[in-house]
Amino acid sequence: MTLARLPWLTATVFLVTTAFTAAQMVWPGVLPALQRQPSMLAGEYWRFFTAWLVHDEGARQIVFNFAALAVAGTFVELMLGRTIWMLAYIAGGLSGEIAGIFWQPFGAGNSVAVCGLIGVLAIWQLRREGVPVIARLVFPLLCFGGALVLIANHDIHGPPLLVGGAIGFLRRAKS
């Protein structure tokens, strides 16, 4: 595998997120300084992005989010490219933070950004050729059906799944 084919973007985001998450364990002030909170709308715009670097729910959230980033991030980066990866991660994350202002004003974690990647993967799966229809449909139906249920329950993960799916529709997969 050449350097160009290594998932260095996913690895970099993983390592940066790990560093900030570790820092919040050592310095308790890191989490409140970076988390999502209503002051985002009063000029603290960096929180729309920094909330993805720290985690407010403990070990379970950290393990799940890091595993999802490693798997979904690597897959999107290698199959769809870094531009789609960045669009899905950033747009998905921002849509989750905007929903969070209304539904969960305080919080932190990169799951909303990772959900953007998962939404792109669902569209990639839907468009795969040479795969039985049922295999192509199960993941997208679960993903987007789940997104609608999440939105109905005011869960901030629903909008990023749909935004990731929309990004997936805008660009055809390379393979």
Image (spheres, rainbow, N blue to C red):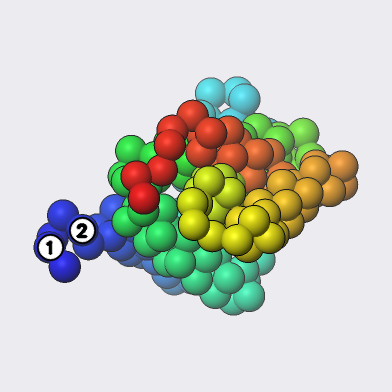
Q: Can residue 113 be seen in the rendering of this structure?
A: no
Residue behind mark 1: 2
Q: In this view, does 93 lie to the left or right of 76?
A: right
Q: Residue, x 59% and y 40% (percent of image)?
A: 165
Q: Which amino acid does label 2 sit on?
A: Arg
What's the CA distance linking mark 2 and mark 1? Answer: 5 Å
- Residue 121 x/y as whole percent: 52, 52
In the depicted structure, whether residue 57 falls above or below residue 95: below
Are the two marked residues, 2 and 1, in contact with CB atoms closer than 8 angstroms?
Answer: yes
Q: Is mark 2 on a helix, strand or loop?
A: helix
Dot 1 alpha-carbon crowd within 10 angstroms: few under 14, some 14 to 19, many 20 or more: few
Q: In this view, does 78 lie to the left or right of 91?
A: left
Q: Is mark 1 on a helix, strand or loop?
A: loop
Residue behind mark 2: 5
> In the depicted view, which residue is nearer to us: 112 or 25?
112
In the depicted structure, whether residue 167 falls above or below residue 108: above
> In the depicted view, which residue is nearer to us: 73 or 39?
73
